Amino acid sequence: MLPWGLAAGAAAVAPVKLLVDDLIQPGEFLSMLFNIVPFAFFGSILALGAFSFGVEFQHRTLPLMLTQPVRRARLWNEKMLALVAAAVTVVLIHWVTQLGMRLMALRWLGREAPLFTMQQTLLIGMFLLATVCSAGFWTLQARSTIGGMALCMGGQVLACLTVALVLDKIYNVSGLEDSIVSGGFVATGVI
């Protein structure tokens, strides 16, 4: 429940951060808090994915669950369904908060609230998809929650670095602004 609450809080604060980012001076305490929001969001999603099976290892209930006359696919599907539901609610919280911020900014400030760019949205979406799909596997391989989080994040970072290196060698492009790089990251995340 704690990782979901932290992810939901970070998802709700992210549109506020985008709106007031140019109003806050660097070095202020509020600036530091707003800069922690992305780390809190991504770390919470990683923890949420790893906790699905990590708690079973921590409490040593996985062998007990596997001895029950229930198909293993059902156990896996129920845990993954709960994880997907939690991730979807976090995305919905962000979307509703962003919609509210856009309406308030338009009404009271007279300007549009800034949004994530398309590349940022694609990278966040691929991170969510890759984490939801692979965190349970990496947690089962590591047999611990923290190990599953580290392997899940490490696998994604290594895959993205490999794609960036290959695209840099082939097309001589770097950075996320190019659509080729974004497309490569999306394809890697889907795979």
Image (tube, rainbow, N blue to C red):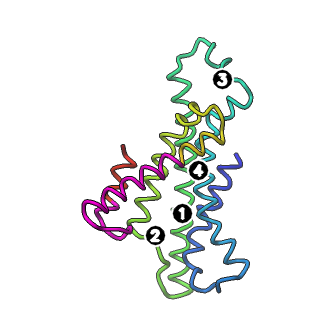
Q: In which quarter of the image is the N terminus?
A: top right
Question: Mark number for residue 62?
Answer: 3
Residue 56 locus on image (x, y percent): 68, 29
- Distance (Cα) linking label 1 and label 4: 19 Å
Residue that carries the numbered disc 1 in the rendered image: 96
Could you tell me which secondary element the residue under label 3 belongs to?
Answer: helix
Is tag 2's residue or tag 4's residue first in the polypeptide sequence? 4
Q: State yes or no: discs 3 and 1 in contact (Cβ < 8 Å).
A: no
Going from the N terminus, do you reach mark 2 or mark 3 first? Answer: 3
Give me the C-alpha separation between circle 2 and circle 3. Answer: 40 Å
Observer-nearest of 184 and 25: 184
For marks 4 and 3 on the same chain, the one whose residue lies earlier in the sequence: 4
Q: What residue type is labelled 4?
A: Ile
- Near-viewer residue (8 or 121): 121
**Residue identified by numbered label 2:** 116
Q: In this view, does 131 lie above or below 93?
A: above
Q: Do the residues labelled 1 and 2 touch (CB within 8 Å)?
A: no
To which quarter of the image does residue 33 belong? bottom right
x, y percentage for residue 141? 56, 31
| Mark sitting earlier along the chain (3/1) | 3
Residue 43 in the image: x percent, y percent? 62, 54
The answer for how far apart the CA atoms under marks 3 and 1 are is 37 Å
- Residue topped by disc 4: 45
Give the residue type at disc 3. Leu
Q: Do the residues labelled 2 and 3 touch (CB within 8 Å)?
A: no
- In this picture, which residue range is highlighted in magenta? 154-182
